[in-house]
Image: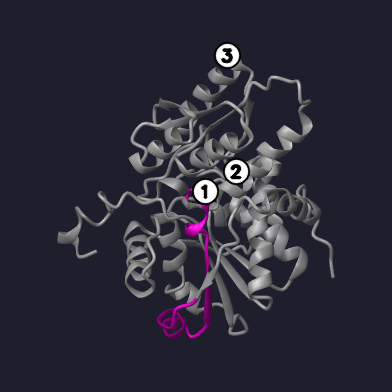
Amino acid sequence: MKAVMSIVKLADVKAARERISGIIKYTPVLQCSEADRLTGRQVYFKAEHLQSTGAFKIRGALNAVLKIKEQSHVQDIHPGVVTHSSGNHGQALARAAQVVGLPCTIIVPKGSPVCKTDAIKGYGAKLVECYPSPTSRVEAMEKVRAETGAVFISPYDHLDVIAGQGTIGLELLEQVPDVDAVLIAMSGGGLASGIAVAIKSLRPSCRIYLVAPPGKMMEQCLRSGEREWPNPPQFLDTIAESIRMQQAGFNTFNILKDLAEKEVFEMSNEEMIEGMKFTFHRMKQVIEAAAGAAVAALFTDKMASLPADIKKVGVIVCGGNVDITNLPWYDSFSKGY
């Protein structure tokens, strides 16, 4: 077996699993005969929407915070942690900090879903709103860090966060040992890079496919091996607020350019909605738009054109933190979505 060369190693992922075991959930894999029929493949949905805090993010956040706690002396008064987040990582870090007893501040863009901001406050974190742009998020976070000395835990580019997300890959290989491909929605890339490290280390033949909103430029960057995104960083125009970051992280891109397939599935708002509806109707599962993107990718022409030897496909259902009082199709009936 060829070793996967990466700044995050399989050993890091295994250590993360040991660290967070017993606190996070071992999420199930779900199947749907209609998905199998429509795709002509066997599809396995890794149900991270059923994870604690409603998304996969608790894995990485908890791994990072527990490591901080391990490395701090008992008598130390730790200044806590801070991050910026559209909601899911914020919830996860707030919960993780609550578990270990650390102060926590979360920067969120104005207009973030109320179901997510309420959860952040419910876990005892301090919530700070900022202008909805990547630059404003970082500026607000840096201000808090300068004032408090808090440790920044990146939503996606922190190595311990990446390792924690990789534990999903270990579980999926236990549940579907002969999986041939995995579809993963991405924003900064922490989820995809962590899973890629775990799966490609143990099953090199498995293909990792990324799913993103239009304008992501990820395929272009993967093919060139260069960061071709414009600066300053920007958000994409998408209903999936948890995957609207255009640029991948520096660490995550370095991992994904080596381990992910060059073909990237770009899913429109309409397709994300159809993915959500399919899961609601056929599987009776409530998922958010980012997860809907990965589900919808199953039913595209690009998926149908993939090699025939891809018989078993994993789909990472990344989160279920959707505002059910404001579903994205409520104002679009006239468009036929």
Q: Magenta residues?
A: 31-53
Identify residue type, mark 2.
Tyr
Q: Are marks 1 and 2 in contact (CB under 8 Å)?
A: yes
Q: 314 or 308: nearer the eye?
A: 314
- Is residue 46 located in the magenta-colored stretch of the structure? yes
Q: 269 above or below 206?
A: above
Identify residue for label 2: 156
Q: 86 above or below 325?
A: above
**Numbered badge on residue 147:** 3
Identify residue type, mark 1.
Ser
**Numbered badge on residue 187:** 1
- Foreground: disc 2 or disc 3: 3
Q: 291 or 168: nearer the eye?
A: 168
Q: Residue at x 61, y 31 (%)?
A: 101
Q: 206 above or below 258?
A: below
- Is residue 165 located in the magenta-colored stretch of the structure? no
